[in-house]
Structures are given as structure tokens and as C-alpha cells.
Image: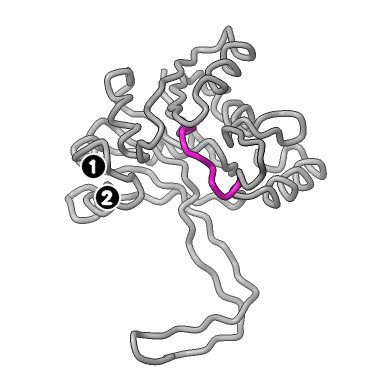
């Protein structure tokens, strides 16, 4: 059984712009929380879940207890201001599987667990990648001047936030103040370990109230969009 760690402890600052604040993974998207959408993505693979909470932890724990009593889920309070890698470090002793998955509690993708696991080797970590197209002109510059202006379509590679690690990832977490995306990944890139990319063709973050509306429209048109 593979452990899946879901990061659900952040403040959700860009989303919580209204008076009534909420733990962002508990935001309803077409009558289901985005956390439930994520859980269902992994659930068919007989996974064990570790929910890493912090902000509004009581709400998160209550939601899990009331809605997923028969699931193999452990809810951990990893602190109010703990960065992402720090949350993993606090959950380390609860991780049972040698290979485990990590993702955020606020985005969806057509991530295929089985195919990603096949890429996992002893010397690599799997990172999901989304190729995002831009319809806008791109200006390139250095510190002193503009070097190029491109008006044709362009694209960037986005970190889609679905990872497959093994316990060697903890070699790169030096303290509970580390951020996964900044401190840890930079250390990995300088080491003998490799990042192996796993491409997803569909990805959608829910950072703002506007993103929520767009995601609901998307899933109303096709509830299986991320399958």
C-alpha cells in the first residue's frame, strides 16, 4: 500500500479574500470539496492517505472524520506556518511505504498514478509537468535591455504538483523551515539524484475565487475531464 501525502495546511491567501475564511482544500467544486476530487484520483489504487493540515485544522479534521470514516486516512496537524518541506519532515515518522506520493490540496490534473510509478527508480524522483501555452507576446530581457520580442504563441513548462518520492528525499530537507519547491528541489538538482518528468495534458489550479468558478464550469461540461 502506497502512502499519499496531501498538503492542506496553507492559508490560501489568494483565495481567502472575503470575510469568511476557509481551508482551501475544503472549497466546494460542484458539490464536492476539491480534496475529495483529489482523494478519488488516488483511491482506486488502494492508497493510504496522510492529510497534512495546519490552517483551520479543526475544520479539516472534522470534515475527514464525518465524511471518510471507513477510509485509510490519517490527519496530522503539521503547524500553522510550516512550509511545505517542513510539513513532510513532521510527517516522516508516519510514512510506512518506502515509495510515496505527495501533492497539494488545491489543484487537479489527469495524473496517472500507475504510469508515474513505473518511472520511479532508486536514483530519481518523479515530478509532474504541464505544458502551458500562452497566446500573448513574450518580451525577453537581460538586466539592461530588451533582447527579443515574440508575438507568436509560446509555452512554458509548469510544475503540476504531483510527485512520487522515496525516503531519500529527506536527505535534502535540512530543517522544518525548508520549502519543498525552493530549498529542497535546488539541493536535489545539485546532487546525483534526478528528476524524471511525468507529463500531464490537463491541469487546473484553484488559487482564486475566479479559478473555482472556471473549474466548476469545466467539470459541469465534462465531469470526467481529469480522468
Which x, y percent locates residue 216?
A: 75, 43
> Against 153, is 227 above or below?
above
Magenta range: 7-15
Residue 180 location (% of width, % of height): 33, 44
If the image is split into quadrants, where does the C terminus sit?
top right
Q: Position of residue 41 (x, y in %)?
A: 59, 31
**Eyeballing the image, is 53 above or below 193?**
above
The residue shown at (57%, 22%) is 59
Would you name the residue on which mark 1 appears? Answer: 123
Judged from this view, the residue extending furthest toward the front is 19
* Res 1 → quadrant: top left
Cα distance between the residues tagged 1 and 2: 19 Å
Q: How is the image coloured?
A: one colour
Tell me: residue 22, above or below residue 218.
above
Residue 181 shown left or right of residue 41 in the figure: left
Mark 1: secondary structure? loop
| Label 2 sits on residue | 183
In the image shown, does 21 or 120 lie closer to the viewer? Answer: 21
Check contact, mark 1 vs mark 2: CB within 8 A.
Answer: no
Amino acid at each position: 500500500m502506497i502512502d499519499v501525502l496531501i498538503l492542506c495546511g496553507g492559508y490560501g491567501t489568494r483565495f481567502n479574500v472575503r470575510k469568511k475564511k476557509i481551508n482551501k482544500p475544503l472549497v466546494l467544486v460542484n458539490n464536492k470539496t476539491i480534496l475529495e476530487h483529489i482523494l478519488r484520483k488516488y483511491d482506486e489504487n488502494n492508497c493510504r492517505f496522510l492529510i497534512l493540515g495546519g490552517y483551520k485544522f479543526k475544520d479539516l479534521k472534522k470534515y475527514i472524520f464525518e465524511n471518510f470514516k471507513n477510509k485509510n486516512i490519517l490527519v496530522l496537524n503539521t503547524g500553522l506556518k510550516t512550509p511545505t518541506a517542513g510539513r513532510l519532515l513532521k510527517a516522516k515518522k508516519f510514512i510506512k511505504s518506502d515509495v510515496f506520493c505527495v501533492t497539494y490540496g488545491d489543484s487537479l490534473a489527469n495524473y496517472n498514478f500507475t504510469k508515474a510509478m513505473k518511472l520511479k527508480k532508486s536514483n530519481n524522483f518523479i515530478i509532474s509537468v504541464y505544458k502551458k501555452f500562452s497566446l500573448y507576446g513574450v518580451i525577453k530581457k537581460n538586466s539592461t535591455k530588451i533582447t527579443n520580442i515574440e508575438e507568436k504563441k509560446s509555452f512554458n513548462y509548469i510544475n503540476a504538483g504531483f510527485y512520487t518520492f522515496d525516503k531519500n528525499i529527506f536527505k535534502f530537507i535540512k530543517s522544518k523551515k525548508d520549502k519543498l519547491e525552493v530549498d529542497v528541489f535546488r539541493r536535489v538538482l545539485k546532487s546525483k539524484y534526478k528528476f524524471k518528468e511525468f507529463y500531464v495534458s490537463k491541469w487546473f489550479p484553484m488559487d482564486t475565487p475566479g479559478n473555482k468558478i472556471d473549474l466548476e464550469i469545466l467539470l459541469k461540461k465534462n465531469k470526467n475531464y481529469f480522468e
